[in-house]
Image (cartoon, grey):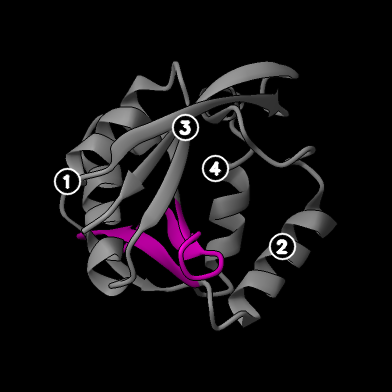
């Protein structure tokens, strides 16, 4: 899938909200907001991150300009993490890998870190394809599943 990254626009937020409230996507991602349907919290989160110059946040769009999802890097130097969310209707077409590769070109700092539910094989494939290597594991409460969930920790060194 051919994608591009652009600055996040106010109009993108309605699409992001719908995507992050998809029950199948929530279960797959596992580590989500405590209550993804809390609109006030959703908008406060996006307002705070869009104002923070340390957060590199982009909207992922397809060749026709439709919003596919979002991708970001955040956190202090040495601990920066990447995150991405692709709408379920775009899964399996290479959008997440292309979006993460494009973000990595924008964010030169290394190391970069990532996390994924241990059973989220699609996300782990994306991270491996972009050069991230497994550096550890954890087990944390995942709001998207309402249960303790195994998590894989990954790092991109260069």
Q: Which residue is mark 4?
A: 19
Q: Residue at x 71, y 42 (%)?
A: 33
Judge left or right: residue 85 versus residue 41: left
- Marks 1 and 3 sit apart, C-alpha to C-alpha, by 22 Å
Q: Residue at x 55, y 69 (%)?
A: 76
Q: How would you classify the magenta stretch by its main secondary structure?
A: strand
Residue mark closest to the camera, 1 vs 3: 3
Q: Are marks 3 and 4 in contact (CB under 8 Å)?
A: no
Label 1 CA crowd tier, 10 Å (few <14, some 14–19, many 20+): few
Q: Which residue is mark 2?
A: 45
- Marks 2 and 1 sit apart, C-alpha to C-alpha, by 29 Å
- Marks 2 and 4 sit apart, C-alpha to C-alpha, by 15 Å
| Viewer can see residue 85 | no
Q: Which residue is mark 1?
A: 1
Q: Which residue is mark 3?
A: 116
Residue mark closest to the camera, 3 vs 4: 3
Specify whether residue 63 is painted magenta: yes
In depth, the one of 64 and 139 nearer the eye is 139
Which span of residues is magenta-colored?
Answer: 56-82
Label 4 CA crowd tier, 10 Å (few <14, some 14–19, many 20+): many
Q: Between disc 2 and disc 4, whose residue precedes?
A: 4
Specify whether residue 144 is painted magenta: no
Numbered disc 4: secondary structure: helix
The answer to whether 50 is drawn above or below residue 2 in the figure is below
Numbered disc 3: secondary structure: strand
Residue 42 placement (x, y as % from top left): 73, 56
Q: Between disc 1 and disc 3, whose residue precedes?
A: 1
């Amino acid at each position: 899938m051919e994608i591009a990254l652009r600055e996040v626009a106010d109009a993108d937020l309605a699409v992001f909200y719908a995507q992050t409230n998809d029950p199948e996507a929530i279960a797959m991602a596992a580590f989500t907001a405590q209550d993804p349907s809390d609109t006030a919290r959703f908008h406060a989160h996006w307002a705070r991150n869009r104002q923070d110059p340390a957060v590199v946040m982009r909207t992922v769009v397809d060749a026709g300009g439709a919003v596919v999802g979002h991708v970001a890097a955040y956190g202090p130097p040495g601990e920066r993490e990447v995150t991405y969310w692709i709408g379920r209707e775009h899964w399996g077409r290479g959008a997440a890998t292309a979006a993460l590769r494009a973000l990595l070109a924008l964010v030169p700092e290394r190391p970069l870190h990532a996390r994924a539910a241990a059973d989220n094989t699609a996300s782990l494939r994306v991270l491996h394809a972009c050069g991230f290597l497994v550096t550890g594991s954890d087990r944390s409460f995942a709001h998207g599943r309402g249960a303790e969930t195994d998590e894989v920790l990954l790092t991109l060194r260069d």
